Image (cartoon, rainbow, N blue to C red):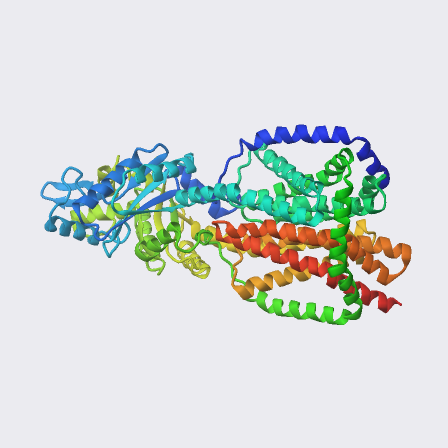
Amino acid sequence: MKVDQISKTIIKLRWLIILTVVFLTAFFGIQVGKLTIDADVLSSLPDDDKHAVLLKKIGQNFGGNRMGIVILETDNIYQTSVIEHIRALTDTISKIEGISSVSSLSNIINIKGGDAGIEIGRLVDEYELPNSDEAFDALRQNIANNAMYKGSIVSEDETSCLVVFTLEDDANVNAVASEVIQKTTALELPEKLYYIGSPMLITYIAELMRSDLTLLLPIAFLLIAIILFISFRSLQGVVLPLLSAVIAIVWSLGMMSLLGYSMSMISNNIPIILLAIGSAYTIHVVNRVNQERKFSTQNSISTALAYIMIPVILAAVTTVIGFVSFVFGAYLDMIVDFGLFTALGTFVACLMALFFAPSLLAVLPIRASESSTTKSNHSLIENKLLIPLSKLLFTKTKLILSLWLVAILISLTGILSIQRSVDIQEYFKKGNPTREAERIMVEKFGGTKPVFVHFKGNMQDPEVLKTMMETSNYMEQSPDIYTSMSVAKLISEINLAIMGERTVPEDLAMVEQMWFLLDGNEVMQRFVSEDLQEGIIISKFKSPDNDAKIAFAKYMDEFIDQNSREGCEIQITGMPFVDITMDRSLINSQLGSISIAIIFVIIIVGLMLRSLKNGLLASLPILAAIIILFGLMGITGISLNIATVLVASVALGIGIDYSIHIISHFNEIYEKSQDLKQAITKSLLISGNAIIINVVSVSAGFLVLVFSDMVPLQYFGILIAISMFSSSLGAMTLLPAIIIILHKKTQ
């Protein structure tokens, strides 16, 4: 079936199409109400990465690997009232369902020897809190003498104290963390409280995501509506593009909910992206219909649809490829999900532009005032911008190409300076309480990123425990590891109380006796599995620098290779190791997704335009735009992270639309007229109007992200807007200039 026949069939079936879309939108709208938010990076880790697999296993076997921290800050921790408040925090948190353990100054284990033998109790007697200078001096001394607690529970400057809690592996992270914040805040303590750790970050990001969706989506909607009204001066020109975009959002999010997916910190961008690009295809359709109505209102919709259908399909296919390319090389599942559901939304937006919007246009009345206003508005853009631009293309062709070449060369030097970052703290603005909490943890408590060393063997075997102690001592020589905790350290503390030496006993029977003293203590479940065949060392990594993480990983791998053996197998994992893999994947996924997208775009555009040369030509402006984009990132210091890594493929998918419309119309006109100047000029006049409207509306939609509370999303919006401007400029200047040069050479 030919394009014109398809167009006429769409108009004939307009009521069926409208009713079907209304029904499906209502269905998916109900599903959207069931959509959940999950900002947990851990749940998005892949199942084929050894560090991610071990991290999840530790969570299952040792009471959860999701550690939350409440920081209590005051002028001096060693006061009776402060100790009471720490106890109140500890007791409050321990009663919350979903929390497996809580540790703080008020309940931490203490091992001491005396005339009556070994006593294992609490560092602070809950029935007799210290209330004198002598009692507090003794408490200070106990903490200073215990390597497990020094600088890990109370800061060395005595101004901050930690309450550390662990969530059960199957706990609802957002619900538990929210309850922790709510109930501890309700205590109305005079000290300042900060919240940090994976559960608190996840919850805070989820709240920011809800806030962004609630605030930014309506602003983007309003901005795009204003721009469309100024551009088209008609109600149809505003309603149809926005309605198409909203339907695409509802269908995409509804399908996400229906298939059991949650909205992540990456897929949070889907509504704004679809609002911006989902309206683009309908803008081209409405623009073409308006142009046809200048000459005749009879069959104007089907005629316009026949002309615009192939370029719109091409634009949608290339955009879908840009999003689907995230499937290849992405480390986090949340990025894969983002790519798939944004691609789905793009496909739906294309369907709405080609089926739903023309159907509505066919049933809505034509207003003469709207038609004349539109005509006048278009003439202004044509006379003031597009016609002068077309003349400039022929008189300053080499200058235009030279300026683009200079911009590309400057950008290539900037690309060499691009920095990468996978630190989730960069999601928050400076001065944010979460960033302040991170600063306190790094400066006073050795950081927040958990490190786990996993041992497999008989945990009561003295040789295994000695290796565990050797591993701890070796780890703590790293400048980024302050202290560590394990069952081996507990045994060595008991041995210190009995024998006067902080070492693991040589005799198995002695270890078993000491183990009996620890048995039943709640801290044991954090260090040893129930069958005593697995154990872990728990520590924290300080530096956010990726090179420091790589150096530490190499440092530990050397030790593990030399000491792991049958009966004592050693593995290491934790967020520093996950960060290393994530950082590596930023480059791999970026190169992989862009390469795949470019290759497929060139092939598909070439096939549909029946010329590989046209496919290459259509890709040149967007390639130049992407080079400029990365150059700006390097020059301005915007880092490549899990949000900005999406920019290039998104920009490629959206930005190539402009080149496709220009080259499609050029080929169509040149084939009929064989007049190069006429073909270039008419192509700009036909497509340029819609491109300008599209760029302004899409950029406005993305620039709304500047008001996001999440920093990478601010940069994401700015970078997409810049790439849209540069790709549209490339489509209307670089592409025509190249076409002019090539045609002059063949003549």
Q: Is 415 situated above or below 70?
A: below
Which of 284/496 is in front?
A: 284
Report the side of 356 relative to 139 (left or right).
right
Count the numbered circles shown: 0
**What residue is at 44 percent from the left and 40 percent from the top?**
57
Q: Quadrant of residue 556?
A: bottom left
Q: Position of residue 309 (x, y in %)?
A: 79, 44
- State which quarter of the image contains the C terminus: bottom right
Residue 224 visible = yes
Q: Position of residue 68 (x, y in %)?
A: 36, 43
Report the side of 292 relative to 237 (left or right).
right
Report the side of 136 relative to 323 (left or right).
left
Q: Residue furthest front?
A: 369
Which of 655/300 is in front?
A: 300
Q: Position of residue 509 (x, y in %)?
A: 23, 41
Residue 601 visible = no
Q: Quadrant of residue 640?
A: bottom right
Q: Position of residue 291 (x, y in %)?
A: 80, 48
Report the side of 436 relative to 408 (left or right).
left
Q: Residue furthest left?
A: 115
Which of 501/389 is in front?
A: 389
- State which quarter of the image contains the N terminus: top right
